[in-house]
Image (spheres, grey):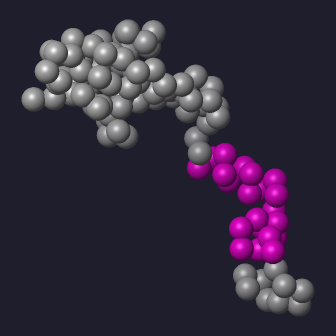
Amino acid sequence: MGSDGAGRVAVTVAWSPAPREVREVALELPAGATVRDALRACGGPVEDGAPCGIWGKPVEPGRILQTGDRIEWYRPLRVDPKKARRERFARQGARATGLFAARRPGAKAGY
């Protein structure tokens, strides 16, 4: 069902080795290949604990691939995004961020 006539599947593997850097590799694998096989073929993690997904939805490494799948291999976050935002807000102050950044002279706070 998910493969082309030659018994192969064409997929793309995408990952981000560093912030603001994305790499993509197009692969052609035998029919019946799994997410794990695709990650190994592009030099990805070989352990099963590596978080990955297809088109943004988490999947298990043993999932069988279909032509057109985009496998995404996720690296762990170094900083909790909510914590980083709170720290940034504390450094900048309430008046320099968000709605308060471009205020009309003489206007009330928040308008």
Which of the two residues, 107 or 40, is positioned nearer the viewer here? 40
Q: Quadrant of residue 32?
A: top left
Magenta stretch: dominant SS?
A: helix
Write the residue at 63% across / 47% down: 83
Residue located 16% across and 15% down the image: 6
Residue 79 pos. (x, y %): 62, 36
Residue 2, how many percent across, how many down? 16, 29
Q: In terms of image quadrants, where is residue 18?
A: top right
Q: Specify whether 25 is left or right of 1.
A: right
The quarter in which the N terminus is drawn is top left
Q: Is residue 103 visible?
A: yes
Q: From this viewpoint, is residue 48 visible?
A: no
Q: Which residues are magenta?
A: 82-102
103, 85: nearer the viewer:
103
Camera-side residue of 75 and 33 = 33
Answer whether residue 87 is magenta in the image.
yes
The x and y percentages for residue 54 are: 32, 34
- Which residue is rendered at x = 41% and y = 30% of the image? 72
